[in-house]
Image (tube, grey):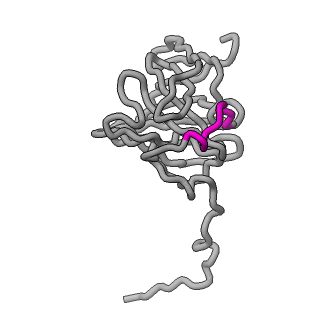
Amino acid sequence: MAVVGVTGCSSFSDPAPSTGVDELVVPTPSPDPDDFVGVIDNPWFVLDEAAYADGDGTLVERTVAEGPEVAGVATTAVTLGGATDLYAQDGSGNVWWFGREGEWRAGLDGAEAGLAMPAEPRLGDGFRRAEVPDEDLRATVVELEGSSVLLESVAGSEVTTERYTRGFGLELVETEAGEVVLVRQAEGE
């Protein structure tokens, strides 16, 4: 039997530099409204009026508007593909998901706000997207290259990959099998 030992590999054990995610409680059972700012300007989670094509090539518009107060926090309502999600950004630049209209809201029936996008995504970071009874909503940063970040997102048994580009926001959503769910359209297309 051969015994293999490895020594001198301290570079593998050095911790990654900390980010704001390290100090966060995700999901958050009781958000403090004073921790949140009135605008979402996270460069990875750009919220502008945009158009996407779904898997059938049908044009889907994204709209952004002032949302309701959820758990004491002012939110931004983002409607895309028939769903309206409620987001807020904390003072460190992390974007939190506070609910989906008609389905759940943080602070009601055991639901808690979770992280939609960290201020500074770090390869390997995993986080809960939200705490919603009977749902598994989480994401992991699986690729971080230059101005692009890839999140593997889990919602129950559905696994999707979301590509975000710094300064551009959500660019592409595809299934585990590689089927395109949404792709952002350039202006004029």
Residue for point 36% across, 89% down: 1
Above or below, 188 relative to 139: above
Residue for point 58% across, 73% down: 13
Tell me which corner region of the image, top left, top right, bottom left or bottom right, holds residue 2. Answer: bottom left
As for residue 58 lying within the magenta part, the answer is no
Residue for point 64% across, 73% down: 11
Above or below, 52 relative to 173: above
Residue 114 x %, y %: 47, 42
Using residue 158 as the reference point, say whether residue 83 is left or right of it: right
Residue for point 45% across, 15% down: 56
Residue 111 x %, y %: 37, 38
Tell me which corner region of the image, top left, top right, bottom left or bottom right, holds residue 133. Answer: top left
Residue 123 x %, y %: 58, 53
As for residue 38 lying within the magenta part, the answer is yes
Viewer-closest of 69 and 23:
69
Using residue 67 as the reference point, say whether residue 48 is left or right of it: right
Using residue 186 as the reference point, say whether residue 105 is left or right of it: left
Viewer-closest of 163 and 2:
163
The magenta-colored residue range is: 33-42
Residue 178 x %, y %: 46, 33
The quarter of the picture where the C terminus appears is top right
Q: Residue furthest left?
A: 134
Using residue 20 as the reference point, say whether residue 167 is left or right of it: right
Above or below, 125 relative to 174: below
Viewer-closest of 23 and 15:
23
